[in-house]
Amino acid sequence: MKNMQIVIDGPAGAGKSTISKIVANTLGFIYIDTGAMYRAVGLKALLLNLDTKNDVASVERLMDDIKIKIEHKTDGQHIFLDGKDVTSEIRTPKVSIAASNVSAFPAVRKKLASLQRELAQSGNIIMDGRDIGSYVLPNAQIKIFLTASIEDRAKRRHNELIEKGENVSFEDVLADMAYRDKNDSGRKLAPLKIPEGALVIDTTGNTLEQSIDILTDAIKERLNCFLK
Ligand code: DC
């Protein structure tokens, strides 16, 4: 098996990254989290005090010389912004919103999509995001669209943030999620949508273990078809 591409798209909080990471480990695939790249751009814009919703020109200009690098370490994917490891720094609610905002800008999407296509050449990969099956890697062998109700997704994200010691209310997380859903699905270029040929898996009401099992089984079944 060489250059096998499994793509997992879906809205925020559906469990894409947690589940993809575990399934990638089980299969011996490289896991690539593309949301981290949009988060790195969002973080850079915030550090420069740019208006991430409206200042298209300034954010797009950042793409001329921004350096985004992905490295795979024993504890998973690390992301470097202009040489600095920002893996933890990008996981805040503020950066989530900024990432969603800047992801609507064409120059941002163009640069990151080309970086993602390059990364996809590094071997057997599982790549997750919003537009991977529909735009970045439309010829991927296996496409999954992972979703769940907005309440379930907000509940999971809220628990994660509380565990990390962030002081946020469930209502704020729910509102952020609704904002990002609307932004990510409503943008003109490569919006969040179910890619053609994707298997849709709804994880509403599942435990994490149940979702992992469902996804692993679905992927193994499809991989077997390719190996026959
Ligand atoms: O997956 P995430 O929550 O870390 O992604 C953060 C934001 O980045 C998300 O709200 C939209 C954007 N994104 C995107 O537009 N396309 C992708 N392939 C991945 C993320």
Image (cartoon, helix red, strand yellow):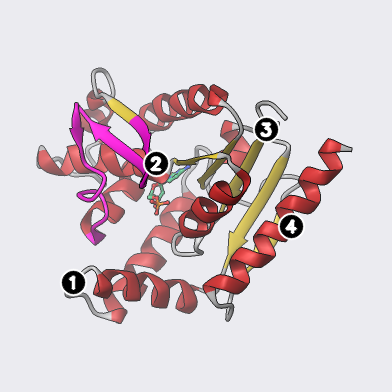
The residue type indicated by label 4 comes to Ala
For residue 80, which numbered disc appears in the image? none
Q: Quadrant of the N terminus?
A: top right
| Label 4 near ligand 1 (CB < 8 Å) | no
Left or right, 84 with respect to 188, comes to: left
- The structure residue drawn at horizontal position 73% and vertical position 60%, both measured from the top left corner, is 217
Lower position in the chain sequence, tag 4 or tag 1: 1
User: Where in the figure is residue 149, as x and y percent of width and height?
Assistant: 54, 74
* Disc 3 + disc 4, Cβ < 8 Å: no
Mark 3 vs 4, N-terminal side: 3
Q: Residue 164 occupies which quadrant of the picture?
A: bottom left
Tell me how far mark 4 sits from mark 1, CA to CA.
35 Å
> In the rendered image, which residue does mark 2 sit on?
104
Quadrant in which the C terminus appears: top right
Reading the chain from its start, which is encountered first: label 2 or label 1? 2
Q: Dot 2: what SS? A: loop
Cα separation, mark 3 vs mark 2, equals 29 Å
Q: Amino acid at mark 3?
A: Met
Q: Which of 94 and 88 lies nearest the eye of the viewer?
A: 88
- Queried whether the magenta region covers residue 76, the answer comes back as yes
As drawn, 121 above or below 160: above
Instruction: Indicate which disc, 3 or 2, sits on the residue closer to the N terminus.
Output: 3
**Circle 4 sits on which residue?**
218
- Which amino acid type is marked by label 2? Ala
**Circles 4 and 1: CB distance less than 8 Å?**
no
The verdict on label 2 being within 8 Å of ligand 1 is: yes
Residue pointed to by mark 3: 4
Label annotation for residue 165 = 1
Tell me what residue is drawn at x 30 percent, y 44 percent. 39
On the rendered structure, is 67 left or right of 36?
A: left
